[in-house]
Image (tube, helix red, strand yellow):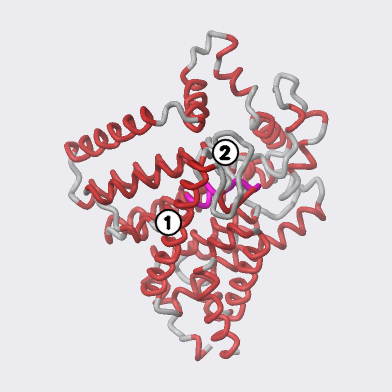
């Protein structure tokens, strides 16, 4: 047993470092990653049991999440049950990552991981800039979508999501402070995210980096309204200059159209917010998912059943421009996905865990001023950002990285407590 664990730890050292490449290559390698980490958690059953049964109730509550996503009232029990069983590996993966970080030289390993992620971030940045100016990336990929960058993900068009993930994950490694070099670095990252052309991911990254920078600066230098005011003025000036320079790009036109939709006079029928919403491509998903929630408020329709339920004629809304496209793999908004597929109980249970982890994370940061921790708090918030479109929480590309980051976040918050809980070394298990 000890030899198996040792070999797995050797393998995990490499697959954690390669995790962003798995995101680019596809879901098969991500699923393999989750299986390996789940197996590691099960092989460390003693430590797993200690964590769940410890006084640190957060571990018990995370483990019990599966109770609230069980397909109690599923419209297609078999489909939901298969997805439910598959989803177990994410929860076990969470514990596997926490146990792994406790068993190794975590500080050195995390720094090494962030260094490798930073190198990939630089490569992606170069690739994005190359495609923006020449039309093709380093591998010859391109896209027919105006104002979008394909980069290494080619037809998937998720490089903006991966770029945001890497930026926030590595934020602590940059050791950002308010000086000319670090302001320039953060500004360059924001520009690259902008030219990728994924509006939702850009807006999330932009707002979180701005908030994180101001928060860190005011806390580290002792809070004062004057320092907060200076930070806000600096960000506003830089943002104003940037958007002014980029206003004629295809990316800016898409973004400005979105903003103008929000600011339009709602009394003007053709330009009202509601009219713009009805003409958007995500409106059919949002409205259908909310109506599904109203029809199945307690337990939802079951994981992976949004597609089947949303096809029904009762969710057809002729007011919507793209009403025929209401059926999709997921509603493209994480809160609506939770409400429609696991109902109010599953939604509330998860939101409580999410908010709780943010609160204890901020409390820990206020004590330690740990930039690595702040970066993972911001990334955690990125996944759960309200209102804006998102990937599928129960999917691989979005859901698995969420649990990956969540494990690191909880480990950084509860590092001392975890060490105290897991007093028996792997060799003695």
The boundaries of the magenta stretch are 155-163
Give how far across and how far down residue 111 sits, in percent: 38, 69
The residue at which mark 2 appears reads as 389
Query: What residue appears at the point 52 percent right and 29 percent down from the top-left corner?
Result: 254
Determine the image quadrant of residue 286.
top right
Q: Quadrant of residue 396?
A: bottom right
For the view shown, which residue lies furthest in the front direction? 134
Residue drawn where x is 28% and y is 46% of the image: 183
In the displayed image of the protein, which residue is found farthest to the top?
268
For mark 1, what is the residue?
122
Q: In this view, does 185 lie to the left or right of 125?
A: left
Q: Is residue 57 visible?
A: yes
Specify whether residue 52 is in view.
no
Residue 343 located left or right of residue 130? right
Percent coordinates x, y for residue 379 in the rendering = 45, 52
SS majority, magenta:
helix
- Of residues 96 and 342, the one nearer the viewer is 96
């Amino acid at each position: 047993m000890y030899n198996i664990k040792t070999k797995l730890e050797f393998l995990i050292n490499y697959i954690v470092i390669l995790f962003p490449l798995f995101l680019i290559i596809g879901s098969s390698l991500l699923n393999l990653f989750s299986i390996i980490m789940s197996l590691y958690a099960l092989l460390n059953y003693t430590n797993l049991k200690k964590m769940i049964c410890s006084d640190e109730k957060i571990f018990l509550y995370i483990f019990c999440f599966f109770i609230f996503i069980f397909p109690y009232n599923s419209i297609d029990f078999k489909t939901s049950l298969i997805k439910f069983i598959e989803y177990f590996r994410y929860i076990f993966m969470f514990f596997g990552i926490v146990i792994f970080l406790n068993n190794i030289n975590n500080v050195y390993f995390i720094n090494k991981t962030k260094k490798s992620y930073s190198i990939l971030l630089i490569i992606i940045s170069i690739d994005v800039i190359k495609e923006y100016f020449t039309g093709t990336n380093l591998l010859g990929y391109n896209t027919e979508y105006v104002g979008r960058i394909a980069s290494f993900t080619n037809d998937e068009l998720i490089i903006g999501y991966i770029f945001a993930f890497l930026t926030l994950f590595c934020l602590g490694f940059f050791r950002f402070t308010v000086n000319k070099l670090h302001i320039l670095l953060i500004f360059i990252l924001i520009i690259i995210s902008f030219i990728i052309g994924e509006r939702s991911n850009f807006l999330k990254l932009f707002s979180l980096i701005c908030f994180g920078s101001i928060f860190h600066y005011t806390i580290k230098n002792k809070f004062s309204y004057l320092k907060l005011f200076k930070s806000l003025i600096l960000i506003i000036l830089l943002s104003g200059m940037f958007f002014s320079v980029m206003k004629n790009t295809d990316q800016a036109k898409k973004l400005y159209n979105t903003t103008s939709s929000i600011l339009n006079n709602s009394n003007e029928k053709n330009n009202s917010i509601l009219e713009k919403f009805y003409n958007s491509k995500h409106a059919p998903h949002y409205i259908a998912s909310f109506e599904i929630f109203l029809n199945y408020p307690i337990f939802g329709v079951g994981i992976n059943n949004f597609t089947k339920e949303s096809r029904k004629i009762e969710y057809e809304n002729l007011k919507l421009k793209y009403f025929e496209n209401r059926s999709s793999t997921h509603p493209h908004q994480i809160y609506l996905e939770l409400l429609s597929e696991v109902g109010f109980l599953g939604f509330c249970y998860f939101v409580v865990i999410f908010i709780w982890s943010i609160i204890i994370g901020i409390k820990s940061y206020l004590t330690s001023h740990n930039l690595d921790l702040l970066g993972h708090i911001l990334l955690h918030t990125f996944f759960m950002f309200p209102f804006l479109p998102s990937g599928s929480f129960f999917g691989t590309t979005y859901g698995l990285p969420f649990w990956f980051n969540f494990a690191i976040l909880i480990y950084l918050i509860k590092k001392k407590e975890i060490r105290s809980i897991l007093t028996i070394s792997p060799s003695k298990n």
